[in-house]
Amino acid sequence: MRLSNNAKITLEKRYLMKDALGKTLETPEQMLTRVAANIARVDSQYYGKSEEETKQIEKRFFEVMDRLEFIPNSPTLMNAGRELQQLSACFVLPIEDSMESIFETLKHMALVQKTGGGTGFAFDRLRPAGDFVQSTNGVASGPISFLKIYDSGTEAVKQGGARRGANMGTLRCDHPDIIEFVTCKETDQDITNFNISVTASDSFMRKATGNNPDPEYDLVNPRTAKTHVDPETGDLKRMNARELFQLILEKAWKNGDPGLIFIDRMNEFNPTPHIGEYETTNPCGEQVLLPYEACCLGSINLGLMVCPQGQVDWQKLRKVIHTAVHFEDNVIDASQYAIPQIEKMHLGNRKIGVGVMGWHDVLVKLGIPYDSEEALELAEKLMKFISKEATNKSVELALERGVFPNFEGSIYDTGKEEDRVRNATRTTIAPTGTISIIAGASSGIEPYFSIAFLRKNVLGGIDLPEVNPLFIEIAERKGFYSKELVERIAERGSVQNDSQVPEEVQRLFKTALEIDYTWHVRHQAAFQKYTDNAVSKTINMPLGASLKEVEEAFILSWKSGCKGITVYRDGSRSSQVLNIGKIGKNGLLKPSSRPPKLSGETTRKDTPMGNLFVTLNKHDGKPFELFAQIGKAGSDIVAFTEAIARLVSLALRCGISIEEIINQLEGIGGGRPVGFGPNRILSVPDAIGKALRELTQLHYNGTVKRELCPECGSGTLVQVESCAKCESCGYSEC
C-alpha cells in the first residue's frame, strides 16, 4: 500500500489488530489480507465456488484495496475476520409509542453501537409532552425527553473501541413538539451525540416558501392521528409553516442544527414500498433506511480513475465498480448482526451503497474548477456511469445467486430481465472521513477544506509544512514551486491571491469556504440525480454568511432534487460582550472593586474529569466574576479549576475582553474528550471557555479558533460531511 503518514497513523490507531497490551499485531497489508479472505469466503461458503475460484476472488478484493482504488466502510476493515464480524456502518431502529418499545430500542442501539455502527431514529410516533397516558393516568414527557435519554446511552457506549457512537434524530414537521425539537440543541449541555433534522414534506416546503396564501397547517398527535388538541386550552393546534421554517433557518445558521430531510423525495425512490415507508436516515443523512434496515458501504477513489493522458479511465472504473458491488454483496452474507430483526431486513433487501471519494482530486487532474458548469456535467456523467455499471453487476449477481428476497412487489418487479437485481439499492455517497485519509483522497464529493497545514512537533520538535501533493506536482511541473511558497501556503491554508501561483491554478485549488454555497448545493444535486440512496454533503459557509444565504441554500436544495441538507457556517456561535476596566496610578490595569451583591447564571458541562458547574456573575450587565466547581473537595482537579476561575475573574475585573479569555481557554486538550461534534468537550479549561461563550452569547469576531485534535493535540478539527477531521494526524469522527 502506498500510504501517507496520516494513513499509517490512522490505520495503527484504529484498524490494525492489537493484543491486550495495545501492541499492534498486523501490518496494513495483513489487515487487507484478513478482510479480503473473510469476504471472499462467502463465494465458496454460500454460492458453490471452488477453492481456486475463491482464491482468485480474494486476490481481486485484496488488489482493489491495496491499490487504494476501493475502500469498504470502517466496520468492515475493523471487524472482518475477527470476533465481532459486524460489517455494516448504517442502521435505522424504530421507536413505537410505548415504554417497552422505547427502552427495547435503547438496548438495540447499544448493541449496534458497540460494534461500530451508527444509528438513526425517528421520534415521530411518540406522543407529545403533556399528552394523556391511559395506563398510568399521567401525562407523557414527550419525544425530546427520550432523545436526551438516548443521547446519554450513547455516551456510555464506546463504539468499536475506536469512537463514540453517532446518531441521527428526526421529527416530523407536523409533530406537536416540533418547536421544542428545533430548539433542543440551542446550548451545548445536552444532546451532544446526535445530529438532528426536521422531516419536511413537500406540502410543508410549499407553504413555508414563496407566497403561499395559506401558510398554516395542522399539528397531528401521533397517538390519535388527528389534529392535536392543546391539553390546557382545548384549542386545535396549528403551525405557521413560514414561522417554523424561519426558526429552523435561525438555528441552522447559529450552529448547524437542525438540517432538513425531504421525506417525500426519499419515499419517491423507495424500492420496496410494500415492505415499509422511509422515516429517517443514518447519522450523516446519506443512507435512507426502513426500520431495522442496515446498509454496507464502500467508496471508489475517483482520483485514481484518470488516464496518464488526462481523461477518465472508464474501463478501469467499470472493473472497480463491478468488484465493489461483488465485495459489498458478500459483506451482507459475511456479517454477523446485533439483533435478528436487522438480519432479517438486511438479508431481505440486500442494500449496498457504493460511493465515491476523491472528487476534487479528479477535477484537479482534469483541469476543471470545482465551481464550474463543466464540473457539474462531469459529476452527472460519472455518477450515471457508476449507477449503470453497479446495476449491471447486480443483475449479473442475481442471475447467479437470485434476486433479493423482497423482490416481489418491489419497483423492480416489472417482468424485465434487466430489472432483476440482487440489491434493492446499489449506490450511496457517504462521508469518507477516515477511509479517504487511508486512500489519500479528498473527502467524498467535498472540495478541499485546506490546501496545506503545518504538522507540529515532528522529527524532534520541528514543525513541517504539508501541502496538497497535487498542488506540489503542478507547481513543480509548471515551474513556480519554491520552499517559501510551501511555507506561505502552509501558514495560510489557501493559494488564493498569491502572486506566485498562476490564476488558472488558483481556480483549481479553491477551498470549501472560498467556493460559493450555491456550487456546494448544485454538486450535491448533480450526484443525487443518479444515486439510489442519498448524498452526504456539508454546505460549508464562511462565518459571515447571512441568514438569507442559509435560506436560499435550503430552498435550492429542495428545488434541485436533493434528499436533505446540512449547512455549517464556519466557526458559528452566538454576541459579543466587552468589559472595560480601570487603569491604576502606575499605568497598570487595576481590578474593579466588587459590589456587595451580584447576580448571574450557572451552567453545567460534562468534562473528561466529571461534571463541571460554571457560574458567571455580571455587574451592570457585563461579565464580572467566575466561579467553577468540579468533583470532590480537596482534589488537585478542584484546586486548578478554582485557580482558573480566580484568574478569569481577575482578568474580567481588569477589563480584559471576555472574547480574549474564551479564545485562550477553548481548544485546550486533555484526556479523552466527551461529547460529539461541535459540542465536544476536550478538557476542564475547554469546558470553562465553552461555558463562558454560552453564558455571554458571544459571536466569534474575526479569526475562527478551531478545536484542537484530541489525538495529536496540535492539529485542528474541520467540519466536513457532518464529521470532524484532523488534517495533521488523520484523526476522524466519521
Image: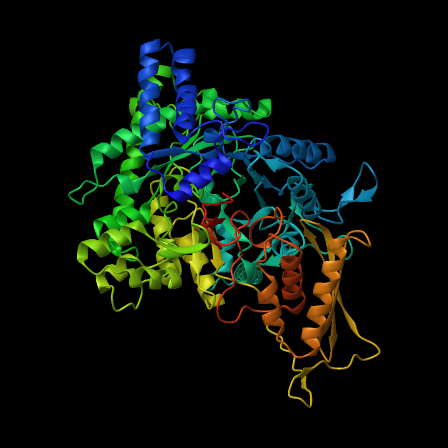
Q: In the shown orientation, is residue 466 left or right of residue 670?
A: left
Colour scheme used in the picture? rainbow
Say above or below: 641 vs 157: below
Seen from this angle, which residue lies furthest left?
309
The residue closer to the viewer here, 40 or 646, is 646
Residue 693 shows up from this direction = yes
Horizontal and vertical percent for residue 408? Answer: 43, 22
User: How many numbered dots are placed on residues in this image?
Assistant: 0
Horizontal and vertical percent for residue 86? Answer: 52, 26
Residue at left 63%, top 68%?
A: 697
Q: In the shown orientation, is residue 443 left or right of residue 566?
A: left
Residue at left 17%, top 41%?
A: 308
Horizontal and vertical percent for residue 367? Answer: 22, 53
Residue 419 shows up from this direction = no
Residue at left 46%, top 69%?
A: 544
Q: In the shown orientation, is residue 119 left or right of residue 309?
A: right
Say above or below: 76 vs 142: above
Seen from this angle, which residue lies furthest bottom?
585
Horizontal and vertical percent for residue 613? Answer: 75, 58
Which quadrant is the N terminus positioned in? top left
